[in-house]
Image: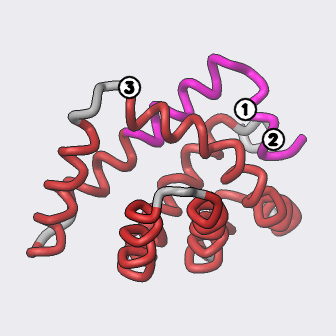
Amino acid sequence: MGLSDILNDRAVKTAVVNDCALLIDRQVSAKGGLGGMALKATYGVVKSAGSGYIPGAIGRILPEVVEALEPMWAEGLQAGDPVAYLSQNQARAAEVILGVTDRRIAKTDNGLVRSSYNKLRQSVKGDVESAVPGLAEIFGAYSPVHQ
């Protein structure tokens, strides 16, 4: 069984999405300094679009992220612990995740969205890296192979 199997069950996918939304909330709230203030303000605006906006966005991108991380998860299974493996290779996992968003942004017709993303891309890499262990834990909690 692969990592993508966690998305086959609608209830499990919903739980993964909700856990990912909580992970993002924690990551944003932990940010400090001026950059953290700006991120918190921007995130607050996005969340004000509706309580389902963030989970909806996660739900839309999650299948692509899981598919992109599948080879690393398989490497981790071979190494004995896919959660630890992703956590130990968080820079690589972050690049894989950001590769998904890069491909999505490249397809958008919205120049403002593309421009904004491109300005933030490098600065968020560290944030994505620091979220990888939490994401790996979420995947591990729902992976039938790792339970």
Looking at the image, residue 56 sits to the left or right of residue 30; the answer is right
25 up-or-down from 42: above or below: above
Q: Residues within 10 Å of mark 1 (few under 14, many from 20)?
A: many
Circles 1, 3 touching at the beta carbon (< 8 Å): no
Residue at image x 53%, y 53%?
A: 135
Q: Which residues are magenta?
A: 1-21
Write down the residue under mark 3: 52
Circles 1, 2 touching at the beta carbon (< 8 Å): no
* Residue 147, x across and y down, in percent: 71, 37
| Sequence order check, earlier mark of 1 and 3 | 1
**Which kind of residue does numbered mark 3 sit on?**
Gly
**Which kind of residue does numbered mark 2 sit on?**
Val
Residue at image x 71%, y 50%?
A: 64
The verdict on residue 14 being magenta is yes
Secondary structure of residue under mark 1: helix
- How far apart are labels 1 and 3 at the CA level? 19 Å
Residue at image x 21%, y 55%?
A: 42
50 up-or-down from 2: above or below: above
Secondary structure of residue under mark 2: loop
Looking at the image, residue 132 sits to the left or right of residue 41; the answer is right
Write down the residue under mark 2: 145
Residue at image x 26%, y 56%?
A: 28
The verdict on residue 68 being magenta is no
Looking at the image, residue 79 sits to the left or right of residue 41; the answer is right
Write down the residue under mark 1: 7
* Residue 58, x across and y down, in percent: 51, 41
Q: Residues within 10 Å of mark 2 (few under 14, many from 20)?
A: some
